[in-house]
């Protein structure tokens, strides 16, 4: 009897002979106390904490004194000094004195000093570009600019080199922000890299061009001016773009290529590899409401390269908190070491002048910042396919090894197990979403925003509790608890194997996240069956748990990176999205990925009700926490801010009818609501919000709700904004709109020539009448269909910015109409925003209203104009 049992005997007549008591005692041998389950959860929590510490460990910043020991190394101390000087200028706004004069003079002064101290073997040129242009940025935005500036330095290569490496960052910042991380730290990093390379006695093989561009936040205009009009643009082949959507931390590689695998060969060599292809796919999907100059260099210049950015502590991004003092010193060394190494390697890469054939996109990811893994999508397809085959082979072999006959009953049990696992995940998802929507209904959303650890109790714990709940309801009287548990583990891996296969077929590079757990789980069972441990009491369990450690580390690492990005991001995704649902789903995804192999062991727990009671208590504690001050979403102060963002424009509006006469004039405060709690959570502070009007009627009647929208991305949430009637703002640079001419080119084409001026930030909304169609615009080469619709008509958005010197926006456009048509053809709105606080005056009412905002908010307060016409 003992031997038959240890072999996992499953014959019906044998198991039928076992009494219920004998079967219970047999199962109890394999089972474990409930506190083992709690212990595993605590172990996983500690493992996550260790990964958090590793991810936040930065290299030691080098000082000038260290240069004697490390003469070729990046010196963080000099970069730190340079950033302090740069941020002391204040916000560097395109079109403002601080950006166009002070920042440019700072850069020119530093560069000239570096040139004077350069090695005599080096040949260096400095150029100041002032450039104007326009281009189509996406299906909605025509981006026009005048007199924006670029400071450009060329470090010449050997033998009159004709190819160049471009390294880029921008020295402008958004209004109200000192721009410490975005993008000041990268500007001073480039200065120090230039300093180190200029002192070398050896020239690089290729030229290195340092582009300090002065209009990125406007958006992306100076980069376009350089790559389309600068004298050195055509020789640029590879770009290293340095950006930020956070403040401090490590700089991550999140875009590479396109389709240039050889670049990763040189990124391998950086001292602190840090990058994820999943971030690239996520960024390029449009989920993240940001863009970088990399897109401009790629799309308008045909360059390949890498895009790297700081992303940690996104609470400071584009706020007054992105200052000099709160950037960790190790961040300078991290970006400096990596960028210096990469630029040096690329500047001597033979592939720059002799491009190798491309082999599609690449998969890349780092392992805890220790080393980089990279391979082409072809190799990825092979690796994934091999892993799928191994996983399926292990599954079918285990079925045979357990001596399960391939009968209808066996397939039924396997099917029920498969369905129970998926059903448990669906229940877990329903629980998580229910929590998210109930909290939203209770006006308690984003409780984790300032304290992300709340996510663990609020969403991780329910996901863990429900992710295996249906497994307790299935049984097989002819299988021991031991075998049932292993089959459950195999079935969980089988599900992830199927998803890995589908992802591979769809060419989704991010499925490398599944490759690791599927492979190591399969490897664990190969060892278990190879040593015939599948029928032991504890050996197989121990091997199985060990096989989960590396996958858990890998997935937790990616989970940490994702949370570090997405949690601060929810503070600026608009009020029309439920952030708890977003974070809940992301949490559910990673929790099930990490915990599902462990859940397979859940039926081994004795007195499992205590395990679930523990989870219930933890969840209840966290549910209570979110209704305490710890659950308040926002936090002020400069040490660890997590502010609520507010964007206000005191706006003057004038509406003209078809006769050109003024139909209506009013004024008010335009609140662009940036997160789910806006403006509800500040109604007790800002008293005049009780007079706020709904914008629904305005949005039906006026272009873009009759509001001065300064960026095309705002069009996605403008309908959910707030309007408070107010007195007229004081505007010293009123907007002018002039129809210079209206000419019939032929019987169906009418050409308009218009000029508008008044502010360094103008936006025009053009909406052709239903019987008219926009067919040509002098600002761009081709007209594409707009993705924004107003009253079933396409809306075209034109953004105009000027930099160093004032300029007007003049252009022509052609409208196609029915033959011999002479009526109006288009609705036009011209808006201006006034962002330079030293150039405009806030009314006493506006000043008092702004004082009412609590210290846990970050307020951007501008003036604006909105003028509508029918032509």
Image (cartoon, rainbow, N blue to C red):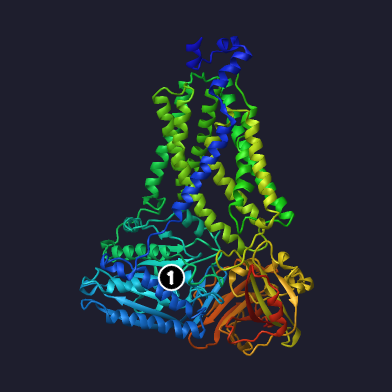
What residue did someone put label 1 on? 185
171 in relation to 102, above or below: above
Which quadrant would residue 784 be assigned to in this image? bottom right
Frontmost residue, 867 versus 174? 174
Frontmost residue, 176 versus 25? 25
Q: Which quadrant, please, contains the C terminus?
A: bottom right
Residue 147 visible in rendering: no
Q: x%, y% of residue 691?
A: 79, 73
At a point 51% along the width and 74% down the height, the residue shown is 217
Q: Secondary structure at mark 1?
A: helix
Residue 707 visible in rendering: yes
From the viewer's perspective, tell me whether residue 786 is left or right of residue 628. left
At a point 57% along the width and 13% down the height, the residue shown is 15
Which quadrant would residue 715 be assigned to in this image? bottom right
Looking at the image, how many numbered discs can be counted on the residues?
1
Frontmost residue, 227 versus 33? 33
11 in relation to 367, above or below: above
Query: Are there few (<14), some (14-19), or many (20+) residues within 10 Å of tag 1?
Result: many
From the viewer's perspective, tell me whether residue 127 is left or right of residue 703. left
Q: Please, which residue is most extreme toward the right here? A: 691
Q: x%, y% of residue 704?
A: 67, 72
At a point 65% along the width and 78% down the height, the residue shown is 819
Q: x%, y% of residue 772?
A: 65, 75
């Amino acid at each position: 009897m003992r031997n038959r049992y240890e072999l996992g005997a499953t014959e019906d007549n044998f198991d039928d002979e076992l009494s219920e008591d004998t079967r219970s005692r047999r199962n109890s041998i394999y089972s474990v106390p409930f506190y083992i389950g709690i212990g595993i959860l605590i172990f996983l929590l500690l493992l996550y904490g260790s990964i958090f510490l590793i991810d936040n460990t930065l290299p030691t910043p080098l000082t000038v004194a260290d240069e004697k020991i490390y003469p070729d190394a990046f010196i963080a101390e000099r970069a730190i000094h340079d950033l302090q000087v740069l941020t002391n200028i204040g916000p560097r706004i395109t079109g403002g004195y601080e950006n166009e004069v002070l920042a440019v003079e700072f850069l020119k002064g530093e560069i000239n000093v570096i040139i004077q101290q350069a090695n005599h073997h080096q040949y260096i040129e400095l150029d100041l570009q002032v450039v104007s242009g326009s281009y189509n940025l996406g299906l909605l935005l025509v981006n026009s600019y005048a007199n924006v500036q670029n400071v450009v330095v060329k470090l010449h290569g050997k033998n009159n080199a004709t190819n160049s490496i471009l390294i880029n960052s921008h020295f402008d910042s958004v209004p109200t922000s000192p721009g410490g991380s975005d993008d000041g730290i990268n500007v001073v990093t480039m200065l120090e890299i230039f300093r180190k390379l200029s002192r070398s006695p050896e020239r690089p093989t290729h030229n290195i061009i340092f582009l300090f561009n002065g209009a990125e936040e406007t958006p992306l205009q100076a980069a376009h001016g350089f790559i389309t009009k600068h004298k050195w643009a055509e020789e640029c082949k590879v770009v290293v773009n340095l950006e930020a959507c956070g403040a401090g931390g490590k700089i991550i590689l999140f875009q590479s290529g396109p389709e240039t695998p050889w670049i990763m060969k040189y990124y391998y060599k950086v001292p602190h590899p840090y990058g994820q292809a999943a971030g690239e796919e996520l960024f390029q999907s449009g989920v993240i409401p940001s863009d970088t100059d990399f897109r401009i260099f790629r799309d308008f210049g045909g360059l390949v390269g890498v895009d790297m950015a700081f992303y940690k502590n996104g609470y400071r991004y584009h706020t007054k908190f992105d200052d000099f003092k709160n950037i960790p010193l190790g961040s300078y060394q991290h970006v400096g070491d990596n960028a210096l190494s990469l630029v040096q390697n690329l500047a001597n890469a033979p592939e720059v002048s002799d491009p190798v054939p491309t082999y599609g996109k690449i998969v890349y990811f780092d392992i805890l910042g220790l080393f980089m893994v990279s391979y082409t999508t072809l190799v990825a397809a092979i690796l994934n396919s091999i892993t799928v085959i191994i996983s399926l082979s292990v599954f079918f072999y285990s079925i045979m090894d357990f001596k399960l006959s391939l009968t209808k009953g066996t397939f039924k049990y396997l099917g029920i197990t498969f369905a129970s696992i998926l059903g448990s995940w669906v229940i877990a998802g329903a629980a998580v979403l229910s929590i998210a929507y109930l909290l939203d209904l209770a006006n308690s959303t984003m409780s984790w925003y300032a304290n992300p650890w709340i996510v663990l109790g609020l969403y991780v714990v329910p996901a863990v509790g429900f992710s295996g709940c249906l497994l307790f309801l299935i049984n097989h009287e002819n299988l021991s608890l031991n075998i049932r548990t292993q089959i459950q583990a195999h079935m969980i891996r089988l599900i992830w194997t199927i998803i890995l296969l589908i992802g591979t077929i769809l060419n989704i590079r991010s499925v490398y996240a599944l490759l690791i757990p599927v492979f190591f789980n399969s490897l664990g069972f190969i060892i278990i069956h190879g040593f015939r441990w599948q029928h032991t009491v504890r050996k197989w369990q121990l091997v199985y748990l060990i096989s989960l450690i590396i996958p858990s580390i890998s997935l937790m690492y990616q989970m940490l990176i994702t949370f570090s990005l997405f949690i601060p991001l929810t503070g600026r995704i608009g009020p029309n999205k439920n952030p708890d649902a977003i974070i809940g789903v992301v949490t559910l995804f990673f929790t099930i990925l990490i915990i599902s192999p462990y859940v397979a062991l859940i039926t081994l727990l004795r007195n499992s009700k205590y395990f679930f009671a523990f989870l219930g208590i933890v969840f209840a504690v966290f549910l209570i926490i979110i209704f305490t001050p710890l659950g308040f979403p926002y936090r002020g102060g400069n040490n660890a801010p997590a502010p609520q963002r507010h964007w206000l424009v005191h706006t003057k509006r004038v509406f003209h009818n078809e006769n050109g006469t003024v139909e209506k004039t009013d004024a008010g405060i335009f609140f662009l609501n940036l997160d789910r709690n806006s403006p509800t959570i500040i109604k007790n502070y800002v008293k005049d919000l009780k007079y706020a009007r709904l914008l629904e009627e305005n949005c039906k009647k006026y272009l873009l709700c009759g509001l001065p929208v300064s960026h095309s991305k705002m069009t996605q949430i403008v309908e959910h904004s707030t309007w408070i009637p107010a007195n007229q703002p004081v505007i010293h640079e009123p907007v002018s709109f002039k129809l210079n001419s209206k000419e019939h080119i032929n019987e169906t084409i009418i050409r308009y020539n218009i000029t508008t001026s008044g502010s360094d930030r103008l936006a025009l909304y053009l909406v052709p009448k239903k019987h008219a169609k926009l067919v040509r615009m002098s600002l761009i080469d081709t007209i594409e269909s707009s993705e924004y619709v107003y009253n079933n008509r396409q809306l075209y958005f034109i953004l105009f910015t000027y930099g160093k010197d004032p300029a007007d926006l003049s252009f022509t456009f052609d409208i196609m109409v029915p033959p011999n048509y002479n009526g109006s053809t288009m609705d036009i709105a011209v808006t201006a925003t006034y962002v330079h606080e030293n150039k405009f005056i806030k009314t006493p009412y506006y000043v008092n209203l702004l004082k009412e905002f609590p210290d846990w908010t970050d307020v951007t307060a501008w003036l604006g104009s909105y003028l509508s016409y029918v032509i």
